[in-house]
Image: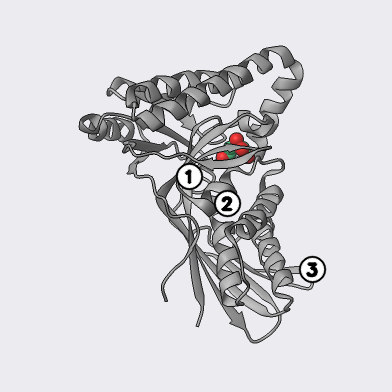
C-alpha cells in the first residue's frame, strides 16, 4: 500500500530572472502534474526511481548505488529528492526504508517547474505515508531546499506555485499573494525541445548584471512596472494589455541574453499567427515559450508553433496545488 501525491507545473507569465533580484513575478499553475508514489520498504534503504527520466538508485548511509541510467546523472538528479525525503523523515522522527516512484507529465528542463513539482509531490507523499502533519508551508520549505540543491540560487517561485497552485504574485522578501483571476487565459505553450539548465541561465544574468549594474537596474525597474500593470490587467480581464506587456517583458529577457534561436523561431511563428502576446517562460536558453491569444485564434497559434517545430499544447490554469491523490 502506498500513497500518491501530485503537484502542478507552472508558467511564469511575467518577471522571471528579475525575481531572483527581489522584483515581483506573476506565476500560474497549469494542468500538467508530477506524481510521486511512496511506500515503506522492509529494509532501511531509500530507493528512488524517476520513470520519465529512466533513472533509479539506492541511497544507503551516504552511499549511492545506481539501478538504472548513468550513475553520475542518476545521483545528481535524484539527490534533491533524497534531501526532501530526509527532511520529512526528520519531521516524522522516524528512520524507515522507502520506495519512491516519480512519474511526471511535465517536460523536464523546459522552464515549466518540473523539478519543483516533483519535489513538492515527493514531500507530500512521504508526509502522508508517515502520518506527519504537513502544512503547505512545510511542503513549500522542503521543496525549496531541494530546488537549492538543483539550481543554486533559486527565488522560490517554482516551489511556491507547485505547492499552492492558482495564480500568484511572488516576491522574495514579501512572499506570495494569490491574484484573483476570473478571466480565462487562453495559453499556448511551445517547447523548443532544447534542454537547458536554470543554474547556467541564472549565472549568465548575474555576470551581465555585474558588468552593467546601472543598465540592468533600469531593466529591473521596467520589469517591476510591467508586473504591476499586469496585475491590473489580470484582475480586469484585459487580455490585450496582458499580451502587450508580455511582448515588452520578452524584449527585456532577450536583452538579458536568455532567449535563443530556438525560442525566437517559435515566438515569431506565434506572433505571425496572431497571438496577442508572446514570450519565453522560465529560465530561457531553450525550454518553452508561451503565447496568449483570443480564443478564436488559439488553434491557429497552436498549429503555427507546431509547424515551426515546437512541441506545443494548449494549457489551462489550475487552482489545485499539491494534493494527495485518492487511493
Ligand atoms: C525559473 O523558473 C525562474 C527563474 O527566475 C529562476 C528562479 O526564479 O528561481 C529563472
Point out the tag, 3 or 2, that comes first from the N-terminus. 3
Q: Residue 191: where, in percent of width, then height?
A: 43, 39
Q: Answer with left or right where residue 266 lies relative to residue 118.
A: left
Q: Residue 137: where, in percent of width, then height?
A: 62, 56
Q: Return the residue at label 2.
A: 116
Query: Please, is residue 177 above or below residue 63 in the view?
Result: above
Marks 1 and 3 sit apart, C-alpha to C-alpha, by 33 Å
Looking at the image, do the residues carrying marks 2 and 1 touch, with CB atoms under 8 Å apart? yes
Q: Quadrant of the C terminus?
A: bottom left
Marks 2 and 1 sit apart, C-alpha to C-alpha, by 10 Å
- Is the shortest distance between ligand 1 and the CB of mark 1 under 8 Å? yes
Which residue occupies 61% across, 77% down? 130
Point out the tag, 2 or 1, that comes first from the N-terminus. 1
Residue 10: numbered disc = 1
Q: Answer with left or right where residue 319 lies relative to residue 128.
A: left
Q: Residues within 10 Å of mark 2 (few under 14, many from 20)?
A: many
- Classify mark 2: helix, strand or loop: helix
Residue 260 visible in the current orientation: no
Which residue occupies 57% across, 23% down? 224
Amino acid at each position: 500500500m502506498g500513497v500518491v501525491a501530485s503537484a502542478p507545473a507552472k508558467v511564469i507569465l511575467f518577471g522571471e530572472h528579475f525575481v531572483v533580484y527581489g522584483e515581483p513575478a506573476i506565476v500560474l499553475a497549469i494542468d500538467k502534474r508530477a506524481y510521486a508514489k511512496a511506500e515503506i520498504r522492509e529494509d532501511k534503504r531509500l530507493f528512488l526511481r524517476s520513470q520519465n527520466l529512466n533513472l533509479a538508485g539506492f541511497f544507503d548511509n551516504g552511499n549511492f548505488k545506481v539501478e538504472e541510467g548513468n550513475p553520475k546523472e542518476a545521483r545528481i538528479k535524484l539527490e534533491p529528492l533524497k534531501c526532501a525525503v530526509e527532511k520529512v523523515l526528520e519531521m516524522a522522527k522516524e528512520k524507515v526504508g522507502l520506495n519512491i516512484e516519480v512519474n511526471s507529465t511535465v517536460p523536464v528542463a523546459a522552464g515549466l517547474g518540473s523539478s519543483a513539482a516533483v519535489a513538492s509531490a515527493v514531500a507530500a507523499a512521504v508526509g502522508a505515508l508517515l502520518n506527519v502533519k504537513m502544512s503547505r508551508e512545510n511542503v513549500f520549505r522542503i521543496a525549496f531546499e531541494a530546488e537549492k540543491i538543483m539550481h543554486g540560487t533559486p527565488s522560490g517561485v517554482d516551489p511556491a506555485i507547485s505547492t499552492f497552485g492558482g495564480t500568484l504574485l511572488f516576491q522574495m522578501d514579501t512572499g506570495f499573494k494569490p491574484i484573483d483571476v476570473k478571466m480565462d487565459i487562453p495559453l499556448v505553450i511551445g517547447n523548443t525541445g532544447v534542454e537547458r539548465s536554470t543554474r547556467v541561465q541564472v549565472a549568465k544574468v548575474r555576470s551581465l548584471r555585474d558588468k552593467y549594474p546601472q543598465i540592468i537596474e533600469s531593466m529591473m525597474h521596467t520589469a517591476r512596472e510591467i508586473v504591476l500593470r499586469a496585475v491590473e490587467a489580470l484582475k480586469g480581464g484585459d487580455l490585450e494589455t496582458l499580451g502587450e506587456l508580455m511582448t515588452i517583458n520578452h524584449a527585456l529577457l532577450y536583452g538579458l541574453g536568455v532567449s535563443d534561436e530556438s525560442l525566437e523561431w517559435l515566438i515569431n511563428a506565434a506572433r505571425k499567427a496572431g497571438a496577442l502576446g508572446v514570450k519565453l517562460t522560465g529560465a530561457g536558453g531553450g525550454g518553452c515559450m508561451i503565447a496568449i491569444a483570443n480564443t478564436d485564434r488559439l488553434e491557429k497559434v497552436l498549429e503555427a508553433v507546431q509547424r515551426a517545430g515546437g512541441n506545443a499544447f494548449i494549457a489551462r490554469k489550475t487552482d489545485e496545488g499539491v494534493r494527495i491523490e485518492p487511493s
